[in-house]
Amino acid sequence: MAKVSSEQLGTEPIGRLLIKQAVPASIGILVMSLNVLVDSIFVGNWIGSIAIAAINVVLPVSFFIAALGMAIGIGGSSIISRALGSGDKGKALQTFGNQITLTLMVTISMVVLGLCFVNELIPAFGGKGSIFEPAKIYYTIVLYGVPFLALCMMGNTVIRAEGKPKFAMIAMIIPSVGNLLMDYIFIYIFDWGMHGAAWATTTGYLLCFAYIFYFFLSKNSELKIGLSHFVLKSNILREIGSLGFVTLARQAVTSIIYLLLNNILFNLGGEALVAIYGIIGRMLMFALFPVFGVTQGFLPIAGFNYGAAQYDRVKESIYTAIKYAALVASIVFVGLMVFPEFLTNLFLSDRLDLPEEEIRTNAFVMRHAPTAMRLVFAATPIIALQLIGAAYFQAVGKAVPALLLTLTRQGFFFIPLILLLPNFLGELGVWFSFPIADVLSTIVTGLYLRNEIKTNLEIN
């Protein structure tokens, strides 16, 4: 693999550079999303649709703790990108060391708390009835591996901040391939059920951590830290915290949404509606992988060039990223509108020896999920503007607007909608809330981004 220097972020043509950054990111996200998708298909076919609902209950808790690592990673990587752009490598090294220390301290503390309150957290997130026991099994095992996942998510953003997208891509592929391989061994061959699904996921986290650890020890990384860099510095912690809080707040709101939706849907239709949301949640991760890939590729380009005061390149990167992301989002939209029945059927077992409860659940899911999927993804073509706009402010270190725009869709619009509309429209009210929130948040982000470009990026 050819050695790549971070300086190329400030010299190569934006279109070519964005493709070089976004394609590996997209492939990595695709493989991770396929992992989530195929993992759910395996679980649904080999264990049952109730198991999909159980995993969906656990995800917000484990993802929130892992998101602490992502928040520290993205907040610190914004600093690293700008520091490398301005030639301040010392600050980049100190930031990276502080990221590692902070990630370990925070995530281990959260895991201890999560294990202490397992019986309270699972029902709170919708793990009721027949969902509780399989959810508890999965939750307890996966939580042990979450600190390694947090370190992986933190390290991956730093690798991308160095301008090494191919290595970041490999780091995202490894846990996915490992998880699917272990799924086959632990669930299908060993017949470990939910225990097997949980250990497969945890094994994937450990494999990813081993690769990222190797990368930073090898000559491929420019960031060679010493013991002094692990000592926490208040000024760096404040900057990591202010920027990382954007990501953390987004994931916190996502966890709240899982809590609300799992409980709202359980009250409206029981385990079957929770299972539908589990399928749609997997599709949200999978279907939008190229849009998220463009967003991830955009971040280091915008951050580096902003740090180097090359504002014309920053503006060009915004427009190019929105154009590319909108194109792939439109392609995704067409596929989801045409094939929702086929996609739903992938998650359901056709075994003849299923329990009667499982057969009823599958029939309900097959009737209702395609309509839900079409409604949830109805505004997909326009979300590129919202994602790139919010990412820009995070990339250039403007924490307050980044936070507000990140929370616009899920916090300011979506949560009020899911609390209100189901009272009038039942389960359809839940699904209608998704596109309405997408449209409103995109309008707000577009207006804010246009003002930012005119005020701070226009070249006189």
Image (tube, helix red, strand yellow):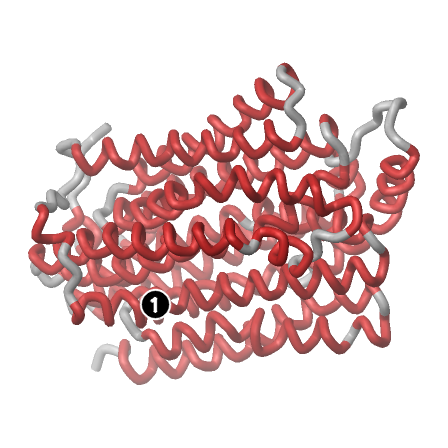
Q: Quadrant of the C terminus?
A: bottom left
Q: Which residue lies furthest to the front in this view?
A: 116
Query: Could you tell whether 283 is left or right of 104 in the image?
Result: right
Residue at (67, 77) in percent of width and height: 416
Please give the residue where the numbered disc 1 appears in the rendered image: 394
The image shows residue 18 at horizontal and vertical percentages of 34, 50
Q: Residue at x 45, y 61 (%)?
A: 322
**Position of 152 relative to 80 (above/below):** above
Question: Is 288 or 413 nearer to us in this picture?
Answer: 413
Q: Indicate the amino acid at tag 1.
A: Gln
The answer to which quarter of the image holds residue 211 is top left
Residue drawn where x is 60% and y is 49% of the image: 58
Residue 213 image-quadrant placement: top left
Corner quadrant of residue 249: bottom left
Q: How many numbered circles are shown? A: 1
Tell whether 203 sits left or right of 399. Answer: right
